[in-house]
Each structure stands twice: as structure tokens, then as C-alpha cells.
Image (tube, grey):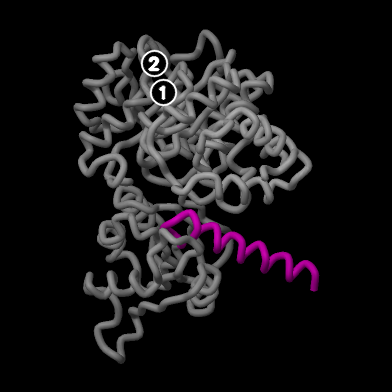
Amino acid sequence: MSPTTSETLTDWLSYIERLHPHTIEMGLARVREVYQRLAIEFAMPVITVGGTNGKGSTCAMLESILMRAGYRVGLYTSPHLIRFNERARLCGEIVADDALTDSFALVEAARGDIQLTYFEFTTLAVLKLFADAGLDAVILEVGLGGRLDAVNLVDADVAIVTSIDIDHTDYLGDTREQIGFEKAGIFRTGRTAICGDPRPPQSLIDHAMEIGTDLWLFGRDFNYSGDKQQWNFAGRGQRRSSLGYPSLRGANQLLNASAALAALEALRNRLPVGAQEVRTGLVMVELPGRFQVLPGRPSVILDVAHNPHAAATLAQNLDNMGFHAYTYAVFGALHDKDIDGVIAQLRDRIDHWCVTDLPLPRAATALQLKEKLLAAGLGPQSVADKDKSIEIFATPADAYANALSRAGENDRIAVFGSFLTVAGVIAAREAGKSRKSSD
């Protein structure tokens, strides 16, 4: 029995999880049929954002700038950290439970006997919600790949591919050329296609040209320059000077910001944005879990880096932080990720590894992570070696508590890997704050 509109969001999500035997089933035929039955149409400009890394940051910058310009904006991202509602934002606010359950009920009524995965079902619900909300602009983060992702049902006015690297090889291929073709699947004939990767695969360029897009490449059609104080953007016909750095920290944020500004240049006749709105939007943007440095001592860094490309960026960002006596890692990962590649990028930055199980069948166990670290030659070199360690834990909260108990005020704790790792630590910190406030 399907839930009714009076059922809770938790009931609906539990029901949706059971609808399909697989978490992922590539292909758009089933979900397109339901999309058409729902008569989803977007009268406002739509921007889709795909890529291996940098999608969330780019989406957040676009939302922040457009909202400062006074536009009503819908933003869809995935996955969430703590609450499902985080995936859908209307005018900067997460969507309420009842709005989601009402939209779930519409999808349930429209699908008939068509099986949908959790992501497909919930994506359709959010798309229907946004299409009917009277918005000025919609920003959609692509979930996995591009060509066969449910978000790709929408013919976006501007499609951005932020970066291309090796990830999700079981579904997308194991080379940048194969993955680039899949990412380029979000481009549309006669519309703007933006690639923010400085080294785009030829497959992406070839596909964009073959289908007749208006292709914007970083370094050719747009770029940035700057110093330690400010930076400048240059597009095809628009320049943005004396910009403050985005509040999102990290080495690649100017690439992401440049792609976002290129998209806004392409849409400037429909969504004009002033210089001050761009400056304020970049300075005020927020996105939890992307090289998020928490206040206090020891320093705590939250980063959902879960593939080698993202781990390399995290390593560079850690290097830029300055001296810390010891670095503790709280690390949990899914077993289908390139865990060895992630470890290789960070091996020289981590002294003490606190590896954790995660509450998902796809997760690597803490013991498996420890075995990979030992195989990479990490960990204490002798019983007397107190400067290196590898410990295993049942939950991210336990791993974080251990790291916090051992770290000194001049040390730092890097929480990274799966979204579930970061979410577990965020939840533990919030629970700790609640206990303190009730005492």
C-alpha cells in the first residue's frame, strides 16, 4: 500500500526505498514516461550542473548570486547530509515536509506500475514541485554521470560540466574520455554548454560540436585572473572586476565561480545580474562539507572528498592551511570508490587514521580500510612509534570522539570520504550541543 498525503515524510521515504530492487538503474525510458504523465514544464531558465567534483559549489554560488539579485530560485542537489529536505531549496529555504509528501503523492499516482528507483522517484517529485512553484530560475545538480541521469530529462538552457575525472567506473567507464562523453550528455542542441575543466576530454568537445551546442571552454571563452586580495572574471563579452574571493574555501573554487559567472553571462538577457549582486553572492555563499573549516581548536575540517581528484584538492587545501603538529583523519568510504587512490593523495598529510564503518551495505568496513592503509605502508613503524596510528571504529561519531580526545590545540582533524562520514560527525556535534544546552 502506498502512503497517503497525510503520512509523514519518513513513511514516504521508507516506501520509496522499497519500490525498486536496485539503488541505481541507468536509463531514462521509465522515468521519462512518468515525467510526461506529470506534464512537467519549465517556463523559467534552467541551469543543470554536472561533473565529477565541484557541482555542489557551483550550484551554491549560482543560487547565492541570483537570490541577491532578487530572483526566486529553486535549487536541487544530492545527496543530503542530515535531512532529505536539504536536497530541495526554494528561495534559500529547504522545502517543508508537507510540500514534499504532496509531490510524492503526485508521482505515485502518475507512475502506475512503472518501477522507479529512490533517486528517480524523488527527482521527479522535486522537478514537479519546482515547475509549479512560479520561480524565476531553477538550478539542478546532476546526480550520477549525465546522459542517463534522471535530471537529464530537463532540457536546460545552460548546462555546466565542472570537472571530469575517474569516478563511478562501473556505470560511466574507466577513462576520462568515456566519462567525458557521459557528462556531455547534459548538453543540448542550440543551447549553451559550459566546461570548467581546464583539460576537457576530446570526447566532450566532439559531442558538444556534433550536436550543435554553443560551447564555452575555460581558457578560450572565459577565464579568471587575480592576486591574494581579489580576482577578475573575463567572459566572451562581459568582465567582472575586483571580486572578493568566494567564502567557500579551496583551491578550485575560482574555477567553479568562473563557470557560474559564464552561465550567468549566457543568460544575462533573461536573468540580468549586477556587479554588486555578484560580489555579495560570492562572499555570502555557504555549502556545508566542502572544505568547511569549523571554528575552535583543534581545527576541524569537513570535506566530502571521496575520489582521488577531490582528495588531491583536499591535500592541496590542507597544505595551504599552514603548520599543524599532527593531522588526524576520520575516514569512511564506499567500497566501490577508488579508496587506494584517495589514500595515495593524502598519505603524506595524515599522521593518525581513525577509520570507520558506515551504515550502508555499499560501505567498506573499517577493517578493510585499515588493511588498505597497511598495504600502502602507513601506520606505526614500530610498537614504540607514537607519531602514527590506525584505529578502527563502528561509527563516524566514535571515530571523531577518539580523534578529538587525542588531538591537541595545535593539531587538526580532517573528516572526509563518503557524505555519510561527514554527516555522522555533523550529527554527533549537533547532539553534543543539544546535550550541553539542556544541562
User: Residue drawn at (54%, 26%), measured in percent from left and top?
Assistant: 34
Q: Examine the structure image and report whether residue 436 is included in the region drawn in magenta.
A: yes
Contact flag, marks 2 and 1 (Cβ < 8 Å) = yes
Q: Is residue 171 left or right of residue 423?
A: left
Residue 397 vertical placement versus 252 (above, below): below
Name the amino acid type tagged 2: Thr
- Percent across and percent down for residue 161 are 36, 30
User: Residue drawn at (51%, 38%), measured in percent from left and top?
Assistant: 116
| SS of the residue under disc 2 | strand
Task: State whether the magenta stretch is mostly helix, strand or loop.
Answer: helix
User: Residue drawn at (42%, 17%), measured in percent from left and top?
Assistant: 239
Name the amino acid type tagged 1: Ala
Q: Nearer the viewer, residue 391 or 235?
A: 391
Gap in Å between the C-alphas at discs 2 and 1?
6 Å
Quadrant containing the C terminus is bottom right
Residue 4 vertical placement versus 17 (above, below): above
The magenta segment is 415-439
> Which residue has dot 2 on it?
192
Q: Nearer the viewer, residue 415 or 121?
A: 121
Quadrant containing the N terminus is top right
- Percent across and percent down for residue 286 are 57, 42
Residue 91 vertical placement versus 193 (above, below): below
Residue 398 badge: none
> Which residue has dot 1 on it?
159
